[in-house]
Image (cartoon, rainbow, N blue to C red):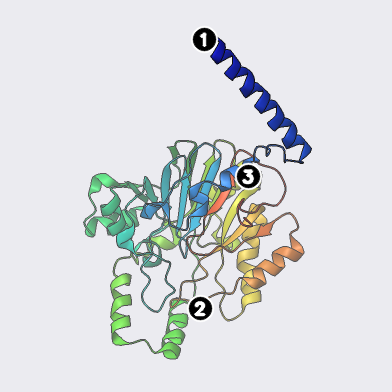
Amino acid sequence: MTKRSGSNTGFIIAVLLFFMMVAGRGSGAAAPAAEPDATASLCRQEACRSWVPACTWGPVPTGSELLVIRWLGNSNYEVSYKGQVILVDNFYNRGSRAPYVGFTPDQVKRADAIFITHGHKDHMSDTAQVALQTNAPVYGHQTVIDTLLKQGVPAQQLHAFNGLETFKFDGFTVQMVHIYHNIGSKTLYRDAIKDYTKPTPAQLAEEAAIDSRGSNSPDITLKGLFAFLFTFDSGFTFLGAESAAHPQGWTDQLKTAVKKHNSTFDVVAVPYQVGYAPLTDIQTKTWPFIQLTNPRLIFPLHHDVFPDFPMSPTEPLAQKIKEELPGSRFYSPLYREPLCFNVRARSSSPLLPLCADK
């Protein structure tokens, strides 16, 4: 009886499944959805959906395809790839007169390495605090190292470079490329902004404390400034230069790096700081650097460092790129915005972050 009952049960189940399948076909039920494409799959990763930086314990990308870049104001960048978090420059507390980047230095608790482009306060004023909180190794010119030693960062955590080194990580390298620092009218701008905004004594004291955590060494102009170049194993590149847009600032190291990559980079963060003559500044400073590096995607950099400089509108640069460089695209990211790229799917076409329209 038991054997016969089991046989009947199996027959009944088979018949029911058959009729359910026929009914589904007859009612026009949709076929199973196709597998999502690679872009959609990458964009579903939490690292591409969250606006919390990885350095403040936000999500990090997984796999060997997904790269996430976040702009954290000025020339501060977070680059996360294969579970690693690399910080470029640390200038997050910029004073109460400046735009808020969305987090405070005390929240930065995660980094695998920190690279400092140079010792001016608007690039390293929070580095000592971040280094002590994360225990990450810090790489910088000797002027940076000397400043951090005075602020209590242990010597074993600090590593000086001169631009000839390449630092290896899992899936990519970082090279700091020596360039020369532009000589600008910082005092002129600061005085004009101060006269107009009339900061309180408390605000001035706050900004003086920030200033004290940077270096004003004269060596920075000719020896202590570096561009940063990330090169991934797939060949994908991310280059950024805080200064030296003008050809007079181009060193042999920069020219060699450009030649090595055949004058084409995937993403370039260009120094963009215009003053009283925006169109002239673009043409004589930013534009030569864009032509030199021939990027597929261009980010502006150093355009929001109020009150040291005026806030620089990015629309004139975007318009010029749109009209004169059809092979490049311009994208001005927001603070902490996850900019996602598939480093394994490269092409010669203009580039945009994968999930910008998702």
Residue identifier under label 1: 1
Mark 3 or mark 1: which is in front?
Answer: 1
Mark 2 or mark 3: which is in front?
Answer: 3
Q: CA distance from mark 3 to mark 1?
A: 57 Å
Helix, strand or loop under label 2? loop
Q: Nearer the viewer, residue 34 or 291?
A: 34
Quarter of image, res 100: bottom left
Residue identifier under label 3: 39
Q: CA distance from mark 2 to mark 1?
A: 91 Å
Residue kind at label 3, given as amino acid type: Thr
Q: Is residue 285 left or right of residue 325?
A: left
Rendering coords of residue 237 (x, y %): 57, 45
Quarter of image, res 314: bottom right
Residue kind at label 1, given as amino acid type: Met
Rendering coords of residue 256 (x, y %): 58, 45
Rendering coords of residue 261 (x, y %): 62, 43
Residue furthest front in the image: 1
Q: Is residue 108 left or right of residue 117?
A: left
Residue kind at label 2, given as amino acid type: Pro
Rendering coords of residue 161 (x, y %): 38, 47
Mark 2 or mark 1: which is in front?
Answer: 1
Query: Does residue 103 show up?
Result: yes
- Of the two numbered discs 2 and 1 on the same chain, state the one appearing first in sequence: 1
Residue at 47% of width from left, 58% of height from top? 51
Residue identifier under label 2: 310
Helix, strand or loop under label 3? helix
